[in-house]
Image: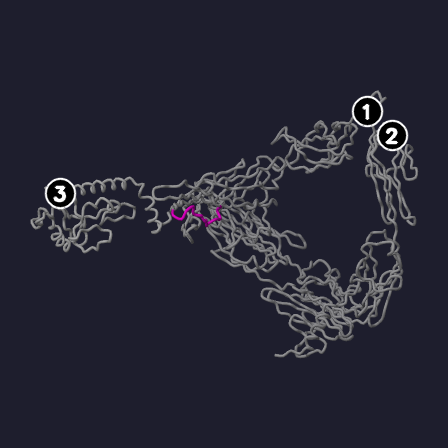
Amino acid sequence: MKSHPGLWISFIILILQLVCAIKVPQDPTIERDLYQPPTITKESEKNYIVDPRDNINIECEATGNPFPTFTWTRNGKFYNVAKDPKVSFRRRSGTLVIDIYGGGRPEDYEGEYQCFARNRHGTALSNKIVLQVSRSPLWPKENLDPVVVNEGASLILQCNPPPSLPPPVIFWMSSSMEPIAQNRRVSQGLNGDLYFSNVLREDAHTDYSCNARSHFTHTIQQKNAYTLKVLTTRGVPERIPTFLLPMGTSSTKLVLRDEDLLLECIASGVPTPEIMWYKKGGELPNQKLKFENFNKTLRISRVSEEDSGEYFCQASNRMGSIRHTITVRVKAAPFWLDKPKDLILAPGENGRLVCRANGNPKPTIQWMMNGEPILATEPNPNFEVAGDTIIFREVQSGNSAVFQCNASNAHGYLLANAFINILDVPSRVLGPRNQLIRVIEYNRTQLDCPFFGSPIPTLRWFKNGQGSNLDGGNYRVHENGTLEISVVRKEDQGKYTCVATNILGNAENTVRLEVKEPTRIIKGPEDQIAKRGTTVRLDCRVRSDPTLRLMVTWMKDDTQLHIGSRMSKEGDALTIFGVAERDQGAYTCVARTELDQDFAKAYLTIQESSTSPTSPLTSEQRDKPDPPMDLELTDLAERSVRLTWTPGDDNNSPITGFIIQFEENRYQPGTWHNLASVPGNVNSALLRLSPYVNYQFRVLALNDLGSSMPSPSSERYQTNGSPPEVNPGDIRGAGTRKDNMEITWTALNSTQAYGPNLRYIVKWRQRHTGEPWSNVTVWTNKHVVWNTPVYTPYEIRVQAENEFGRAPEPGTVIGYSGEDLPSQPKNFRFYDPNRELIILEWSPPEHPNGNLTGYSLRYQAFNGSRFARPVVEILSPNQTKYTLTRTDPISRYRFTLSARTQVGAGEVVTADTPLKQDEAYTKNQVDIATQGWFIGLMCAVALLVLILLIVCFIKRSRGGKYPVREKKEVALGPDDQKDEDGSFDYRFFGSDEDNKPLQGSQTSIDGTIKQQESDDSLVDYGEGGEGQFNEDGSFIGQYTVKKDKDETEGNESSEATSPVNAIYSLA
């Protein structure tokens, strides 16, 4: 779809104009002259409950110009106030006053009221106010039979107060008006009933009375008392908990956003069950959580949608536990996201009112104008309703009105008034005219020029009536018309004019700026050391602007100095005659004008005269101060006391401060602790104290040379006790063995105990299991939990307690039971991307059994039976990959990997790199000559060859040459020595053949030479009967017989003739 450029231009102009709504300044002259639609400024609450004994005031206040008139509706109809003599309007107000003192019946005026404030520019509405009269009906008389119950059984004493408005405050008391003691076993529910988890014989009383106190009259009504009789037995059987409230295993709770959520679980059982609370799938919101009524009530303040979900209350004792599930659904009455605001426009301008609200369920938005619904069927040329927004276009003077936005859902409604006021006002400049501003040179200043107009005027500044508009550089004009000069100089002095302009006219104002010279002390006093009785002069020479009134004053120790008879001011200098010890101190010269000030300070030290018989000190002798004296305690209070002392001699070096220390004699007697420090010019301090401490104080003085000796100790002051206000810190849980967890914490010190018999309630449970808390009370700062599973997270709480009570509920910390050796790493594997690298990878152990501290990797190169020195690498716990660079491409590697915890290294996984075939052959060629078995074999072969040669020579001597035919046709090489008749000459057997391996032998994969098995021998041929000698004596039978034998036995027989059998055959 093609868009029209003109629509985009109009849209951009509209957006720019929407953000330029006019704001009326808070100026009486403007507010008096401009008309304005009504605005409701005060109204009664929506649900208005009143005291029937007093006059009833239904509030409705409003502003507007002209001042609005007021009317009311009651129960949706016009309420004619003039017809009821008991009802009147408050003067210049819309508030209704109902005269109850004059005989009016308050019940006759109950109903729904709404106020309308009108003037000719619009109508504003109040909320609908539901008026109800407080009621406190009497308790019906009833005769209550005695309640008889067995000891150990549960019991509910019902209150059932009569309906009241508002609901009364319920409490249980005895006939003597003593409160019924409540605890984990006996407590009052939210419904006012009294619940006994189990009844004891001491519960037998005749005066259990429920009381109701009304909200307005504060009168107390008392129900007839219950008489409780307890049937005692020899032994009370223990029983598993059951819920008294709520019933069943699950329930639901609906709560509105920003209200308080109250969940309650009360259980019976012997012994008394303990109630614990959980939330499914998350933690309880600790920041806004509170446990009440001995943990039986869970309160979450100002709930939000995140607080919805399933909550569990668990009741447990040593017989067992039960659980109740409460499903919480959070809904929301409407609440504002963007509340509509008043809008002021000039004729022809555009604007909008926005009304955005949210809730659960999502609220519906309804617009009204002057109290009447805006119907979609009646279009208005000047505005358009688009859901939660009203858009105004080219408004005219007659379009002023008050619009109401109503956002409502099933849980309530919101009503907001916002007017649109169409003004056409010429430019006006507000504030004083022809103002004079004086400023010190080099300071920052602002020249104000408040203005107003409709349409919004533009504002410009000019200097001395000429030149261009001032903006930029050293000048900055703010939206409210103020001209800011960041650094004022002499040349900035002059007359400044601001001019406001709109289409209806101009207005201007003038501000005169004078720049003054700053006030400076050009020569101030200097530190001096003077002898007692001499004259001292402290200089103070000042330069300031001559047109400003200068005043120079002197201060001593930061207090105003009154010039006495021993002092005089000569010009601005101060002269002191006959100085004494009391003149010692810090002197400050202050030069002040009406615009600025400057000051300079010096310290005067007074020493004893050298001729004084009381002291031999000279002006050069200085020392640490003497200790303070005369400590006194005053203003004794529960948590504070005032300590006063007399400073000692400063020994010619001014005292700069005091340190106050305390000692207590209960926990650390004789040990002094710093409590406070104060400046050297004061001699008392209000000390903040802790409960249940027997204090004793002392003071140390400080100067530039150090601290004095401690003062004498004060008298002791003991504060009263109270429950601890803090719990122990630095709580930790860690195992010292694999089957325990040691819980430790930092104990409270003497000023935190707050009472005698300080002890700690230690609670623990496995995390995320929902099991009940285990607890123990200890008096040290450590507790060991035994028989724990290995490295399991636990929730831990430590709460301080003394004889006055417990500290607040502690926070939860996470600890872990003891660690053990981890299992072996998983998925250990390696690969070599090339002949230089080996890459190892693995996964963490399936059972780490603790916090992994790293991995131990041991690797060792080996070649056959030779091993290199092993290398051990300690790797980080996050590392699961390691790259090894080979030292050579032939060696294999053996790897051993194990995970580590604080206990040590766990199970190992071992692997060797595989043997490659080409590497194996090369390795064997290098390695075989060094093997002992190979050397022995070679010796045996040499011996056999020698024997064979001897046999050959013997044969030669008998028959010469022997024709030899192999059973297989083997081609002879060119180097073979052969006679013409085909026979071998045995003279050549010992030459070349000695260096060749035996025919038919094989080299094994491990480098050994293995002789092929054969049962072929000369015996077979010599004694078989079938072998024959030729006429020349040569042995030829072996070849014929051997051939037959080969055909049956295959190729397994040796092709060489056994020399042993040859010798045997010759015999």
Looking at the rendered structure, the kind of residue marked 1 is Thr
Q: Magenta segment, which residues?
A: 876-890
Of marks 1 and 2, the one in the foreground: 1
What is the CA distance from the residue labelled 2 to the residue labelled 3? 150 Å
How far is the residue under mark 3 from the one under mark 1? 139 Å
Position of residue 986 in the picture relative to residue 823 (left or right): left
The residue beneath circle 3 is 957
Q: Residues within 10 Å of mark 3 (few under 14, many from 20)?
A: few
Task: In this rendered view, identify the residue nearer to me: 292 or 75.
Answer: 292
Observer-nearest of 294 and 229: 294
Q: Position of residue 43 (x, y in %)?
A: 72, 63
The three-letter amino acid code for the residue at tag 2 is Val
Q: Amino acid at mark 3?
A: Ser
Element class at badge 2: loop
Query: Which residue was labeled with disc 1?
Result: 618
Q: For the residue labelled by badge 1, is the local secondary structure a helix, a strand or a loop?
A: loop
